[in-house]
Image: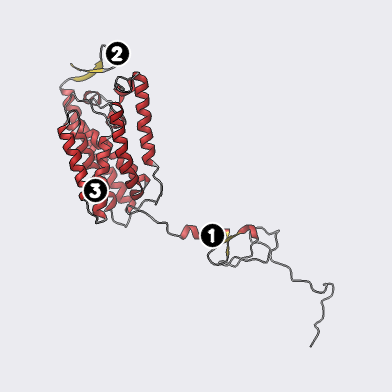
Amino acid sequence: MTNSPVPPGEPVGARPELPACARHPDRPTGLRCTRCERPACPDCLREASVGYQCVDCVREGQRTVRRPTTVAGGRVTGTPLVTPVLMALNVIVFVITAAQAGSVGDNQDSSLFNTWTLLPPAVANGEFWRLLTSGFLHFGPAHLVLNMLALWMLGRELEPVLGRVRFSAVYLLSLLGGGVTAYVFGAAFSNVAGASGAIFGLMGAMLVVLLRRRSSPGPVMTIIALNVFISITVPGISLLGHLGGLVVGALVTAGLLYAPRERRNAWQAGAVVALLLVLLSLVPVRNAQLLDAGLHVVPCRDGVHVCIGVR
């Protein structure tokens, strides 16, 4: 047994001085990050799978961890957000039109309805917003409830698959596609409104998703066929708007799901923009036809509705 000498001026049993925290130099600590091994005080450490890591290493690890994505490359989300927002917008617009008209059943007798509905001569004379805003109008509560029910059933399935941004692109392009198709190929004296074009677009999107996943498309094809049959047989329904939304929804979803993984975001954005440009390129042709015919809109005698005149 031997005795070691005690250094002068140091009390017996004294411990060596502790290192300072890397982020707080005024805090001595005996703890270290298990990843970078730097000294760290308790406030700077976070529990990890093995030991504790400093906040800098935790932040660096979060940047390098690959986040899960959907089949379309979007961020994985649990609860639908865009779908209820779209439903709320449709309901709000309906309430406004009903309040202006003083009637729930005849809400089309309102100034907002007449400003937003799809009247081909009005579009030809520069009111291009009607191609999109008409998709947020509905003729009476039954029309609204049926479309919102379909939107909820389809949206809650598609939004988590596509991601919020891509789902929004599919919905809005389908809505515009239905409006443009009804405008370009429909009757000049038609009056089109409703979210049905976008709803059919979501049906087309669901069909493409099932094909991409190699699942049976039979149930969705049956639903589409049934709705197309109803559109043909029931008077007052815009078959062209429905078919236009269906085709556009299927095309834009195919562009999203079948884009190559390399530079996928760029390919997807290009597909969306290309389809948008195609739709917009059809509008001037129809404009020229209606303007050559001298069609225009004028206020009706009741001061509420708008009428179509011929110059």
User: Is residue 111 something that shows in the picture?
Assistant: yes
x and y percent of residue 56 in the render?
A: 56, 59
Front in this rendered view, residue 185 or 236? 236
Mark 3 and mark 1: Cα distance apart in space: 42 Å
x and y percent of residue 290 in the render?
A: 18, 25
Q: Residue at x 25, y 23 (%)?
A: 122
Q: Residues within 10 Å of mark 2 (few under 14, many from 20)?
A: few
32 shown above or below 225: below
Camera-near label (3 vs 1) is 3
Mark 3 and mark 2: Cα distance apart in space: 45 Å
Three-letter code, disc 3: Leu
**Residue 207, numbered label:** 3
Which residue is under mark 2? 303
User: Could you tell me which secondary element the residue under label 1 belongs to?
Assistant: helix
Quadrant (top left, top right, bottom left, bottom right) of the C terminus:
top left
Which residue is under mark 1? 58
User: Could you tell me which secondary element the residue under label 2 belongs to?
Assistant: loop
Three-letter code, disc 2: Gly
